[in-house]
Image (cartoon, coloured by chain):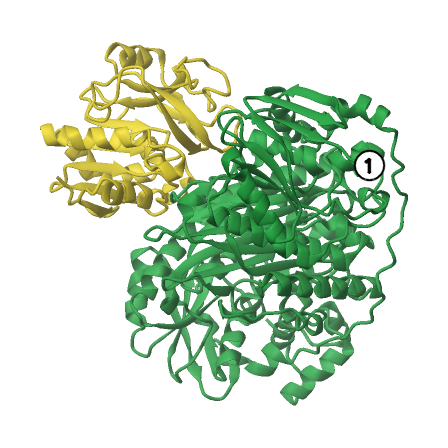
Chain colours: A green, B yellow
Amino acid sequence: MPETIVTAEVVTEHGLTPEEYVRIQEILGREPNFTELGIFSVMWSEHCSYKSSRVHLKRLPTGGPQVLQGPGENAGVVDIGEGLAAVFKIESHNHPSFVEPFQGAATGVGGILRDIFTMGARPLAILDALRFGPPDDPKNRAIAEGVVSGIAFYGNCIGVPTVGGDLYFDPCYAANPLVNALCLGIAPKQKIFLARATGIGNPVIYVGAKTGRDGIHGASLLASAEFDEASAAKRPNVQIGDPFLEKLLLEALLEALDTDAIIGLQDMGAAGLTCSTCEMAARSGTGIEIELDKVPQRETGMTPYEIMLSESQERMLVVAEKDRAPEVQEVFRKWGLDAVVIGQVTDDGVLRVRHHGQVVAEIPARPLADDCPVYQRPMQAPAAPSGKLVSFVSDEEARRNLRDNFLQLLASPNIASRRWIYQQYDHMVRTNTVLHPERGDAAVLRLKGSRRGLALTVDGNGRWCRLDPQRGAQLAVAEAARNLVAVGARPLAVTNCLNFGNPEKPEIMGQFSAVIDGMAEACRVFGTPVTGGNVSFYNETRGQGIHPTPVIGMLGLLDNVERALGSGLRAVGSAIVLLGGKSGVERAPEPAFSSSEYARLIYGVTGGEPPEIDLAYEKRVQDCVLEAHRRALLAAAHDISDGGLLVALAECCFAAEPARGVAVTLGGKQPLEAVLFGEEPSRLLLEVDEKQLAELLRLAREYQVEARQLGWTSAGEFRVHFNRQVVLEEDIATLREVWQAGLPQALQTVGSL
Amino acid sequence: MKFGVVVFPGSNCDHDAFHVLSSVLGQPTEWVWHQSTQVNHLDAIVLPGGFSYGDYLRTGALASHSPVLGAVKKFAERGGLVLGICNGFQILLEAGLLPGAMLRNRRLKFLCRFVHLRVETTDTPFTTVCQPGQVLKMPIAHMDGNYFAGEATLRELERNHQIAFRYATPAGEVVDDAEANPNGALANIAGICNRERNVLGLMPHPDRSSEALMGSTDGLAIFQSLVQSLITH
């Protein structure tokens, strides 16, 4: 079959600009052939090259004594003591999940899992950050249902627990759902493997599934361009997941790594064989040559172009010590998997691809992997927050409507229990899950054979980031850290998934740059360097972009996992303390309140600005919680976030087993709605035994943070006083029912399961 | 005393069962590869949970034809103790070591949550340390746990006291609602044994409920019963 001639039109179809094509000609010293053009186009796609984001990402803090491996590898690696390393990363699978929700989400999980076990780590847990359009549209419900089923299908079958995540519904995600999957793994520090191809003459081994025509140009065409009506035609670009095969690959690979015959390895994810070969060689200053005839193939007649660009799932590239390939192959054979030597490491720095013995591509590996043009794209500073502000009704009227509005808030898809989702995920398999979903502010996992434990959370409020990208990013990092300290974990490091619109638009790049600034500043304050992650641009359909949505995945360490702190109230008659917040500061409440979930739901307002955050104060609040926990003063802790104080109080009751209630007394000069539903950051609810209350209040003074007793825990009633009046009195069981039914009702799906 | 935990391709809870037997109970435990037929040196065999062969066909269908199952059948015929947990139970059904079949959960979704089981018989080597009517809290995690059998089979199971566990409320009432019997199992059946009482399968996970840190220690009763039965034999 004659190869397609490379014309200007073909170059454009590959998403390459004329300038980029000139660069390719310079690197090669000649015209590329069709296969080489395809190889360049995937490596230099936005998805693989980070060409728009790289100049900004440099501003993030990435170092620290705990960081064993920062950005640039398959995943970040963090030292957690006792000779152990935590390996973690978050990645988006947004575009595929819109085109085909089930498979898109499933392969998103499969991909991030491979990133983790490629480093030699056994996957310990998965979390997912999901964003969908409003559930009143059947299309959005179908996407949500498909995505959740896809995650469940893959995670359950491969046997890695899905232990947490977060979820928001907003119109901006209707045609651009977000599916960000995070995976955490664990390995002995000395046994972390990197993507290296060293040792001239060492064999390059292809392992795992066979290569088919699926997923060709997934990275370059799906993930690196806007969407339109024709997007359904891109369905063949979505890969199909096989979690059973990946389970075999996982077990075989970890066993093969124990032979010590393996030097380096890389997942074949985006851009498949192309990416794994040239990146491994580029990082090692070597070359790689491969013969495509030896690549296990699912179908006949595949062209070099197709084989090099296929994104078939569940494949990896392994470089082994010379003469030791048979040992590695033997392990894979035991697990019934292909493991074929397809080439070798060379000393000339060239990626050389043969097909039927003929050279079909010959490209210097390092320039291919690293010399993609980097863009300082034009930026426009984010517009000052605007939009209508809430004008509060009188306290009298607010009090009359309080019960109805509170129930409506509890049932709102952004607040309601996530039980319908997490019950579909096996969140317990491998018996390490210590804090189950909705039992604490972060997932907590034990490490068998150690007293230590790891805590994980994902957070990111897109609504706030749209109103003020920089502050929104700070708030996201602060909330992630707060969620970790609420379970008694010390924040260690961050992985981030940066979901944005079209980077060719100056206002989008302006948002991106502001988010990076906000995140960098907050990560410095909390001492949590960024160890990796993923940038997802082009989340736009028909020119309509999403809110800038940075999702922060944060890892924390518990010295004693048996002391993990839940959010559920434990005793009857213990004190409820509100720690943090800045009650002394008088500010007009309207602008911050207008960006709250309550304002959106009850007033139909999304405007104003995100609440202000004082990062130094937030840090003191968090340090105070950790010290209080160290002194064993706390029975439960819960961050106050979406929905504000009243929702947080209710959540503490819902997480309790057996049932608990509260009786609290609130008040002040601010409007009732602002006090009960405002989303001011740097606040937590703490349950404290009465005998230890004085010490906790003393500690708060020491840390110069506010602390105030709100009331007491009770056996099952929810009672709220405001300025000396009882404003709400309700049975916890009733509230819980509303909260638990909210999501299945909104999705119009089966009730309590 | 020696326990064996079978590893099928796609077994996920093999480590969980192994961990409870070896680390929590301190019993000598070894892995049994799915292609092995050497099981005679073992005293009890656990078929663990997971997705054997991906369960792309009927759950447990492929595993029931693997070489190790032939050996397990002979082992059971000779009176050896066999415990099937979740996917292990499904495999025992497919292999004909236990009667009945699994349908998809009544709400057609995978379900992972704690349930309560009422112990229906203590006259099995897997329930000897339990009290009759005792309520055990254990998690389930499956898509196909809706037990089904024909009327004659059900009558026989009841007559021979082969129903070991039924889904129940925390107070031990056997009611057929989505809260107590979430997968919709026939007669709330959560676990059964064979007529000879040496083979038992159950959908809930005692392996996930044998340590306080995992939220329940009720599952330990199953493994402790096994150990005790082997000691007294």
Is B205 on the left-hand or right-hand side of B105? left
Is A520 on the left-hand or right-hand side of A186? right
Badge 1 density bin: few <14, some 14–19, many ≥20, Cα 10 Å: few
User: How far from the left and from the top, in percent, is residue B105?
Assistant: 47, 26
From the viewer's perspective, is residue A551 above or below residue B57? below
Name the one closer to the observer, A315 or A476.
Answer: A476
> How many marks overall?
1
Amino acid at circle 1 = Lys
Residue A239 shows in this picture: no
Is B172 on the left-hand or right-hand side of A591? left
Name the one closer to the observer, B179 or B64.
Answer: B179
User: How far from the left and from the top, in percent, is residue B70?
Assistant: 20, 38
User: How far from the left and from the top, in percent, is residue B41?
Assistant: 11, 42
Name the one closer to the observer, A653 or B207.
Answer: A653
Secondary-structure class at tag 1 = loop
Q: To which residue does mark 1 refer?
A: A669
Label 1: chain? A
From the viewer's perspective, is residue A276 above or below residue A680? below
Name the one closer to the observer, B153 or A567.
Answer: A567
